[in-house]
Amino acid sequence: MPGITREEVAHLARLARLELKDEELDHFAGQLDDIIGAVARVSEVADQDVPPTSHPLPLTNVMRADEVRPSLTPEQALSGAPAQEQQRFKVPQILGEE
Amino acid sequence: MTVTDLVSYEDALATYEPVMGLEVHVELGTKTKMFCGCSTALGADANTQTCPTCLGLPGSLPVVNAIGVESAIKIGLALNCSIAEWCRFARKNYFYPDMPKNFQTSQYDEPIAFDGYLDVQLEDGEVFRVEIERAHMEEDTGKSTHVGGATGRIHGASHSLLDYNRAGIPLIEIVTKPIKGAGERAPEVAKAYVAELRELIKALGVSEARMEMGQMRCDVNLSLMPKGSEKFGTRSETKNVNSLRSVERAARFEIQRHAAVLSSGGTIIQETRHFHEEDGSTTSGRVKEEAEDYRYFPEPDLVPVAPSREWVEELRKGLPELPRLRRNRLREEWGVSEHDMQSILNAGAVDLIVATTEAGADAAAARKWWMGELARRANEDGVDLDALPITPEQVARVAALVAEGSLNDKLARQTIEGVLAGEGTPDEVVEKRGLKVVSDEGALGKAVDEAIESNAAIADKIRGGKVAAAGALVGAVMKATRGQADAARVRELILEKLGVEG
């Protein structure tokens, strides 16, 4: 039975830079375990002769010509940014005090 | 670990065998990004070349750039790789603001090209084969500016600013297999490999591969194992080593650093390291995340790429002559040594000399001007040779004027100076500055007579058989004509008038 441990949830949270409290870790570990369990049932149905599906349609080689299309204006691009400075997206400190 | 703790290079190599892996990222020269139609033109204002796709906005859909795929196949073929019949893109998930999507679209276990090699030639002519693991397609990240810390560094910064113009520009990552057996020549092999790869990329026309502009960047992975061992040691990954010289220095430094750690009983930590141009050292970066931490999975928004064998063969047929073979052919045609050819390559003069000979100059003259006067000027001005405001056709014209006797070397140099100063074509400069060789035999004869008259003692020596003394008289005539005479003709006239056989 596949599943996910509390330690793995904590690890994923760290990779995603999410700060989770102890009770949140317990909570999400339970929920994620249920979800993974539900999805895992698919592999019980799929036999060896069914390859994993990454794309629902049998399409290949969808490509575009190398032609410039209009971009957004910087105002449009930045319109959803929580903060901006010098026409750039402003993000909080990346490295904490270590 | 400080710089002073290094062991000498010789001692390190006496005990250990270096193993290298080189990862090179090449920014393709496509007009648009890898997965959207935003322009890739350099120098645009911040965030003027973005769209919902490269900003990772909900509902946007990427579509791969056909030239991006074509370029990847060309690179793969030129590196003697197999080209995948079917491959997918993958999401490389990581949380860092240089990618607004929180993942980089890359390829994971299905690269478009794999299992190849590149033969590189070292300065003494030895050929070393570097095996290629894979070449895969991915995209570049945005550009961060760190604010509030010392000299723009991320350490101590209060916040950072992101420009996503570069996010999504096509990249091809080329990864070698472990390079073993190079021994003390490992740093030299690393440099020669990156140099050869750069020439190859340029010859394919898929990128200008200017390292100083970040169009080509190298990561140097290095480990040491005791001599005779087959088991690789733990490696360090020195990131963003961005000049040929730095590649060599970084490899050398890491060999010495690893040896120092291992010899004193320590262990190497697998980590990324930063290279410092100032002193050629590296310092510790972050501890490397494991591949599984990137949680790669097939990119559901992009369909698989399945290059038809017909397309691949068509691209193979169109491949240019490999740079190393071309250089060897030219070297023989030009009759120069390995060493001279290396200098020509390092100066970025190969194509310029070829273009000059194609414009009619002979190879020796073309080489003389590009590697002499023009190389000196480029060096003084701190620009690349091909950035000088003179064309190969113009250099060929100067060479032709010299060959027909209209200019001597000194006048030719002045002509080139005029062209570089924007005074026009060689013919216009010659005309405006009045640089033609004095070919009026009457005027020249008069100057020769005067020189003989005022240097009677020297003239006597020459009459007495000391032909070598004629040089002094030639000099006097050249001075009198302000350099505008054909020195060989002047010498002839002097000997003629003094009744001596040259």
Image (spheres, coloured by chain):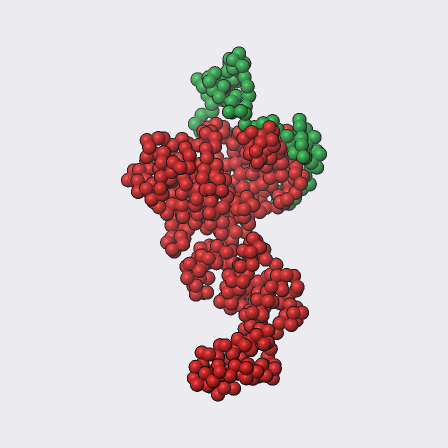
Chain colours: A green, B red
Left or right of B119 on screen, residue B171: right
Question: Residue B454's image quarter?
Answer: bottom right
Q: Considering only vertical position in the picture, is B247 above or below A29?
A: below
Question: Residue B342's image quarter?
Answer: bottom left
Q: Residue at x 44, y 17 (%)?
A: A1
Residue B356 at x, y = what percent? 55, 64
Q: Considering only vertical position in the picture, is B479 above or below B372?
A: below
Residue B467 at x, y = what percent? 45, 81
Q: Considering only vertical position in the picture, is B103 above or below B381?
A: above
Question: Residue B396's image quarter?
Answer: bottom right
Report the residue that reaches farthest toward the bottom. B499
Q: Residue at x 61, y 59 (%)?
A: B389
Q: Is residue B85 visible?
A: no
Q: Residue at x 63, y 70 (%)?
A: B430
Quadrant where the N terminus of chain B is found in the figure: top left
Q: Residue at x 59, y 67 (%)?
A: B414
Report the residue that reaches farthest toward the top. A23
Q: Is residue B2 visible?
A: yes
Front residue (pair A33, B128): B128
